[in-house]
Image: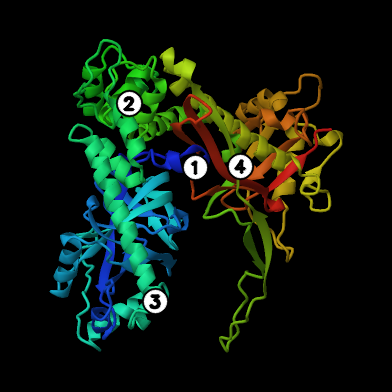
Amino acid sequence: MTNLMNQTSSFVPNARPVALAMTTPIELLSADAALSSATAGASDAAAETSTPVLKRFAMSAYTGGAMTLRGWRHATVIDLAGLAWSSKPRPILKDHNPSLIVGHTDSVSVVDGVLRVSGVVSGAGSVAREIIEAGVNGFPWQASVGAYATETEEIRKGRSAIANGRSFDGPVSIVRRSVLGEISFVALGADDATEARIAAESAGNTEERTMTELEQGTHEQVAQAATPTADTTSITARMRAEAAAESTRIAAIRAACGTQHMSIEAKAITEGWDETRTELEVLRASRPVGNAPAAHIHSSNATPDIIEAALCKAGRLTGLEQHFHDKTLEAADRRYGRGIGLQEVLLEAAWANGHTGRSIKGDTRGVLQAAFSNLTLPGIFSNVANKFLLTGFTAVEGTWREISAIRSVSDFKQITSYRLNGAFAYDEIGPAGELKAGDVSEESFTNQVKTYGKMFSVTRQDIINDDLGALTALPTRIGRGAALKLNQVFWSAFLANSAFFTTARKNFASGPSSAFGIDALTAAEQLFLDQTDTDGQPLALSPAALLVPTALNSRAAQLMNSTEIRDTAASTKYPTANPHAGKFRTLYSAYLSNATLTGNSATAWYLLGNPADVPLVEVAFLNGREVPTVETAEADFSVLGVQMRGYFDFGVALQDWRGGVKMAGG
């Protein structure tokens, strides 16, 4: 089985079945596999009929935990909520080998966070007999699931995410969307503590009852297996006919592929190709390109990390040392010292997947199909794109972060936060030592995460022109676009504050006396310090930041940095010390006075508290991911190129009005 390389994320546009086949299966080694025989008496009944009863099996194929998988950088979790499968029976193999057929499923379900599978041992060869006999002898078979990963989320160290009803701490890879391909009996899975027992043949045997119980809830007829009826016999005959047809299909594929096209053979068997399609793919792979020989073996020791480093160097990514080890950067210099182009990356991936062409021109579609036939190339593109995305994202104004409370949420439902109110000040205790109970009430604040995103394309023209900027500059712009959207949503919510800052709440002042200056700042500070809780008791918190529009930024900086204030127009005596020098952090935002936003003002300014004490505004991120994600894949059939999309999950809402004071500025 082909190893998958780690990637930030990959996706399949429009999720068409033919596109899904372009990803590479991953082995999810896990869980118990259990094989059971029919209930007592079934074998005797079968002897009296022309069609024997097929033996049954049941598996707990995956229990939802983290696994260590070959070719994946971190522990991996399959989100069962995003696992899809066809209504058709799934093949049951041995060791993920399409030629080692054991049987097929008739039931696949997720029960209590466990992927449960049951079916019949319909294989007619020695492999099926081996599975049965070894199991009866007590061999502890385990299960391994073959699935196609179509969307993966990388959780970095220090973060956590929810999947299968559990919380997983990073670093961990969570496969959010996948498609079930086949399930295999294996000798050793990722969880070595699992075991499987084979039911004995004797009637009433304890092991047999245990296996029957395992299948209840997913295939109840196991508990009722008896002398086959006419319906059972016809179903068995149909299953055998299907198995025979499958064997004929596989034999035709092997004959068409011979020994020269093993990769096509494996893909054709796994994806259900017929003989005609297989022969066509073999013909395409065998044809010469230009004057090149019909067969070309490309030798490459370039790993995905080295290619990623070369792409980042060519795109002049800043801070390379933060993203790659020194040895990786040195290897990239040795192999691609002259620089790497977009065409070279595509060809490297295509050659690694068996493509024989020497040039991308004239066969762009063929190169793209070969390059994207597993998740290695989308992973490389996604990793590189996300690094350049951060460059664009962090370059945009980030004042919102300085005044917000940040929280992580696990879904898109509306969330509610609570602030407890009440008489928390201690009472004097009398001689009897009796403590009085305090009355506690609460205030609630809501927020909700939404998704924002956009799709872009690296066109066929970009590829033929070998325009690496399409892969490096485009993600930078996507990152900038995400930051601009976050700012737009944030400041739109922040400026919709006419009912939030009011005279009645004593956190708002207007008129000439509110115009920015030392006296107005003194008044704003007093408004903040005089804030009380619901019982009329002082909050006893101090303001921390002075937020102004760009028109007031220089004056605010001057006021905060000046130690003296002089009035040369008057002849009266006055103090020269600046009581506010260095007292507050000065922040500004161009959005406060932006004409496109409702509530904008070039004169209004704010004195805000520490968001960790009293959160005035909150920003929530899905699964704690505070930056957008870029994903890449081969373009939809109607577009000849590579598609790239960026998306960002966040929500913004005003929270506690006691966290700040607004001055209208005149």
Q: Which quadrant, please, contains the N terminus?
A: top left
Q: Among all residues in the image, which is located at the extreme right?
A: 511
Task: Look at the picture and state if 315 lies above or below 54.
Answer: above
Amino acid on which disc 1 is placed: Ala
Report the side of 636 relative to 563 (left or right): left
Nearest the eye: 544 or 8:
8
Of the pair 602 and 303, the residue shown nearer to us: 303
Residue, disc 1: 15
> Which residue is denoted by mark 2 in the rendering?
284
Residue type at mark 2: give it.
Arg
Task: Give the class, few, some or many, for how many residues have Cα within 10 Å of label 4's Cα (few <14, many ≥20).
Answer: many
Is the residue marked by circle 3 packed among few (<14), some (14-19), or many (20+) residues within 10 Å? few
Residue assigned mark 4: 403
Q: Nearer the viewer, mark 1 or mark 2?
A: 2
Tell me if residue 159 can be seen: no
Secondary structure, mark 2, is helix
Residue 276 or residue 195, whichever sits in front: 276
Q: CA distance from mark 3 to mark 1?
A: 41 Å
State which tag comes first along the sequence, 4 or 3.
3
x and y percentages locating residue 138 in the rendered image? 14, 74
